[in-house]
Amino acid sequence: MSGALFDLDRLEASAREAERSQKEVELADRKSRHLQQKILNLQARRNELRTQLPQVTSQPPDLEAATKEGKKLMNALKKLRQLQEIQKLYRLTGVSVQEKTENKLMLRFDTSYNHEYVDEHYIELTRSKKQDGYQVSHHTLPAFIPMSQLEVHLETELKVFVDRIREYLQAFVIRRGQVKMLESKLAEILRSEIETSLPVDYVSISLQSSDDVPIKITLCYTDLRSVHPTKAEVSIIETPGFRKGFHQGALRFPTCSRR
């Protein structure tokens, strides 16, 4: 009896072992089929890519052309930036031609102060019927520039005319800038705003000196193309606290009369 039970146990153990072996075989078989399918999918993708390869290899000329166009664009942008820098520098000092036809010439004058662009003015020139030169038809210049005197140069030498206009404009801008700078630096001792004429060829400055003496400084520019005063006068301002003529003679410079 005991021998029969032992044999039964052995048979059951063998059956369980066989069942485990069968499951392991089935699992290995599923893994194998999965890998085979994956390989087939990869092979199919490879074949698909191979069929597309001729199309891809035929595209490099277009890509090359696009690259060349991109390089041209970058070079153009670089040149544009360089031209803009040159234009900025030129506007600080120069004169440019805005328009030119057979019978008309439009000039632009750019002014600057302390390395900063200030403003621009225009002159439209037309061919003179009597002469080979030009004549002024329109302009935006300040009224104090003596156009009637300068236009005579248009009959013979355009460059002289342009240079004279630029000198008048630039000197005016510099004198005006100098006055603004003085107002800023002398703000604490200025008795009132600095007075100037329209072309800034006359400047009157009233100051309170360090020893509380009220002083008036007058500057005069006889040449509108100059940025340095040609005459100056320093005098004490008469107030109730100071006698007439007190030390005044020692402070006087050549008389400067307003133009």
Image (cartoon, rainbow, N blue to C red):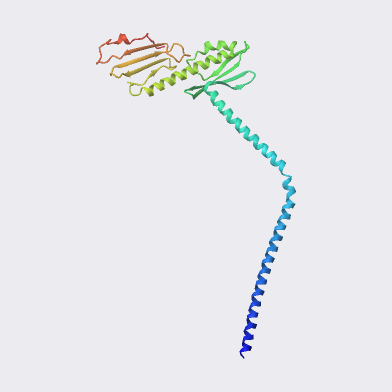
Give the number of marks: 0
Q: Measuring from the top left, give residue 90's x and y in whole percent.
A: 55, 23
Q: Measuring from the top left, give residue 185's x and y in whole percent.
A: 37, 23
The quadrant of the rendering that contains the C terminus is top left
Q: Give the residue at x 63% y 83%.
A: 10
Q: Measuring from the top left, give residue 59's x and y in whole percent.
A: 72, 44
Up/down of 57 relative to 174, above or below: below
Q: Measuring from the top left, give residue 116's x and y in whole percent.
A: 48, 25
Toward the bottom, the furthest residue is 1
**Viewer-closest of 144 and 74:** 74
Which quarter of the figure has residue 213?
top left
Q: Is residue 127 left or right of residue 109?
A: right
Q: Give the residue at x 65% y 37%.
A: 70
**Viewer-closest of 133 and 190:** 190
The reply to whether residue 121 is visible in this rendering is no
Q: Is residue 20 left or right of residue 237?
A: right
The reply to whether residue 205 is visible in this rendering is yes
Q: Give the residue at x 55% y 14%.
A: 161
The quadrant of the rendering that contains the N terminus is bottom right
